[in-house]
Amino acid sequence: MTHTASPDAIVVGAGIVGAACAAALAGEGMRVLVLEAGIAGGGTTAAGMGHLVVMDDSPAQLALTAWSVRLWREMAPFLPPPAEWDPCGTLWVAEDAAQMAAVHAKAALYRSAGIRSEVLDAAALAAAEPRLRPGLAGALLVPDDAVLYPPGAALHLVRAAREAGGAIEVREGARVDAIEAGAVSSGGERLAAAVIVNAAGAAAPRLTPDLPVVPRKGHLVITDRAPGFCRHQLVELGYLTSAHASTGDSVAFNVQPRRTGQVLIGSSRELAGWDAAVNRGIVRRMLRRAAGFMPGLGALSAIRVWTGFRPATADSLPLIGPWERTPGCWIAAGHEGLGITTAPATARLLADLIAGRTPAIDPAPFAPSRARAA
Amino acid sequence: MTAIIVDGRSIPAEPGTTVAAALLNAGIWSFRTSVSGEPRGPLCGMGICHECRVTIDGVAHRRGCLEPVADQMVVVTNA
């Protein structure tokens, strides 16, 4: 029998959030069993861009993302090559004077939060990214943002925790059918643990009914290799409007250089249930939007298009904390498009709450009970 | 006989043959370099595998096995 035959904690889901939580709980000295329905890091974690980005939609989101990007940067020297760490920074691209005003406001907010940023005028932006179309107003450069390959990073989190002496067992192909107080059932087997963490992402409400998380579909396109095509993660400032419109479909210019020289092109948002089929209409809109900012994209070949499901909440904040209705059950889900960014801080916050410590940031905005059932 | 310019060197090519055939006839087997740094060359010879990609007249990722040669065409391998 393995050392996790009688675990102290069971984590449901081995996406990047579940992996980070398992690593943090193992760091507390707990024996951790991770149950993953598919393969580790193979769900929403594998579908995303892997952009580690400070976001400021709300003070709570700024606190969580800033903390978490800092934690990633601390881990960066230890990340293995498969994690494809690239400290390329983010450029928030402004199209006009009104968006430039938003750039200055964002710079001031970041300064007050201790996050480095630099305002680029039109000429400096053109020099930084020559393939952007002429006539853009400028940008905000956030140099401490980064990019990685999420499945590689998720596996590293588990491995690093083990190397530090942590007891973690990951079972793949182990679908959990129900979570109850102090136990889960999986394939007819009942597995008990004092702590159960639902980190099943968009599937979390299947196990914790009434959890207000819905799948929000996205598309990504990756091109052939074109080394040096762009140098930063490029996001239009209007992304915030697109990302936060809680209903309806939207697309935004969001382009990323990969370590392979490929260009990853996003992004789209749709509420389409669990229909994973590629929606050609929205892909066309997304690529048109991207080519509007970078006309040269039209000359590259797209070699793959795929979809994924972000676990979305109504207020764009994840659910991190106890689920009072089921004693011993904790939630770490609902990270929408920021799960890769916020996995390390989520795990620290959750471990602090489970251990009864005061977390580094206020946990109240993330309390799963804050939201009414959707 | 026509000639194409491969990596700055003129090589002869039979009219009507493909870029891939011309390169192979000239003893050039490595057309490109994989992400992990390995040499790659034509495999299927019919446009499916993409292993024979070269830069032709400044356009990257052209499949050498599908492109007929043209006199003084400029080909860059391992771009």
Image (spheres, coloured by chain):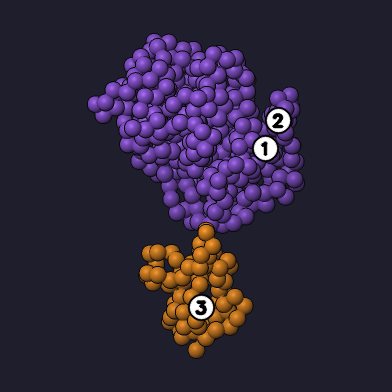
Instruction: Give, as a three-letter code, the residue at label 1.
Output: Asp
Which chain letter goes with mark 3?
B
Q: Is residue B47 left or right of residue A71?
A: left
Which chain letter goes with mark 2?
A
Give the class, few, some or many, for how many residues have Cα within 10 Å of label 2's Cα (few <14, many ≥20).
some
Above or below B11: residue A36? above
Task: State which quarter of the image contains the C terminus of chain B.
Answer: bottom right
Tag 2 and tag 1 share a subunit: yes
Above or below A350: residue A138? below
Residue at position x 53%, y 30% from top?
A343
Q: Are marks 2 and 1 in contact (CB under 8 Å)?
A: yes
- The residue where tag 3 is placed is B28
- The residue where tag 1 is placed is A144
**Which is more toward the observer, A261 or A315?**
A261
Q: Mark 2 or mark 1: which comes first in sequence?
A: 2
* Gap in angstroms between the C-alphas marked 3 and 2: 52 Å
Q: What's the colour of chain B in the image?
A: orange
Which chain letter goes with mark 1?
A
Q: Measuring from the top left, give residue A88's x and y in whole percent.
A: 64, 44
Residue at position x 57%, y 27% from top?
A345
Instruction: Give, as a three-letter code, the residue at label 3.
Output: Ile
**Which is more toward the observer, A177 or A309?**
A177
Above or below A323: residue A87? below
